[in-house]
Image (cartoon, rainbow, N blue to C red):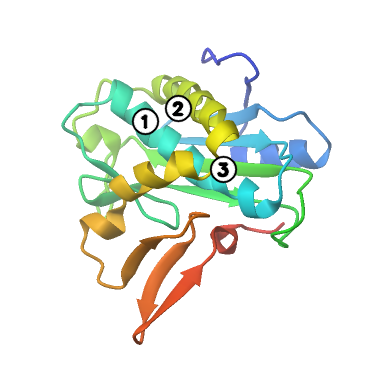
Amino acid sequence: MPDFPPLLRGMLAAEPWAAAVEAARTGCDGGLICWRGGATLDAAIVFAPEVPLSEAAQMQSLTALALRDGLGAIGPAEMPVHLTWDGGVMVNGAEAGRVSAISPVSEPYLVPDWLVTAFTIRFLPVDDLERTALWSEGAGDVTPEDLLESWARHLMHRLSVWEEARARSLHADLTGCSWEVEAGNAGFVGLDEGLGRLRRVDGAVTLDPLTDLLEIP
C-alpha cells in the first residue's frame, strides 16, 4: 500500500472513480483516495469544499498540476509534460492520460457537499501515434505506486498554498505548462483570473469557465 501524507488515506478499488463518488455521496470525510494500478494508474480523491463551486472547480487544475509535479520529481528530467485546459496530460507531445472532476451541483455560486477529481495515466505502451505511455517515454523505473505517492505529496503542498492564494497559486504554472501555448493554438488567448479558458472566436474573445468541465452525476 502506498504511503500517503497525513490527512490522506487510500483504498484499493476496481473502479476508483465510481468508488470515490459513492463514498462522497455517503458522507465520507475529504482526503479519501481510491486507486488501482496496473497498465494504467487510475486514482480519484474526495474533497469536502468550503467554497463555492466556481472556486472548488479549481481542484481539477490543482490535481493536474500535482500530477505533473509528481512526474517531474520521480521521472526523467528531460521528459516534457504539458497540460491541456480541458484535462489532457501530454507527455512528449502525445496524450498519456486525463484529469477530470465531478460535482453534485452545477451552479457556480453553490458550495457543493463534495467534489471528486480523478486521473488516469498510462504506463504500458500503446500502438497509437497520438497517444503514449510513461514507459514509452523513458520512465521505465517509475511504478504506479511511486507516482501515486509522489502525486499525493505534491497535492498536499499545492493545497496548502491554494488555501492562501487560491487561483493565483496555479495561474502562472498552468500557463507555463499549457499545451495550447506549446502547440501554438491560434485561438487560445490564455486563462482568466478564475482559470477559465479565453479563446478567440470570429474576432471576439469568449470565456469558457472551469465549471464547464465538471461532470454531474
Task: Name the foreground residue: 77 vs 109.
Answer: 109
Neighbours of disc 3 within 10 Å: few (<14), some (14-19), many (20+): many
Identity, as a three-letter code, of the amino acid under mark 3 = Met
Q: Which mark is residue 158?
A: none
**Which one is earlier in the sequence, the residue at label 1 or at label 3?**
3
* Point 21% across, 60% down: residue: 183
Q: Are marks 2 and 3 in contact (CB under 8 Å)?
A: no
Q: Which mark is residue 151?
A: 2
Q: Are marks 1 and 3 in contact (CB under 8 Å)?
A: no
Q: Secondary structure at mark 2?
A: helix
> To which residue does mark 3 refer?
59
Neighbours of disc 2 within 10 Å: few (<14), some (14-19), many (20+): many
**Which one is earlier in the sequence, the residue at label 1 or at label 2?**
1
> To which residue does mark 1 refer?
69
* Point 51% across, 15% down: residue: 2
Give the left or right position of residue 136, taking residue 178 as reference: left
* Point 71% across, 44% down: residue: 51
Residue 188 visible (yes or no) = yes
Q: Secondary structure at mark 3?
A: helix
Give the left or right position of residue 2, taking residue 33 as reference: left
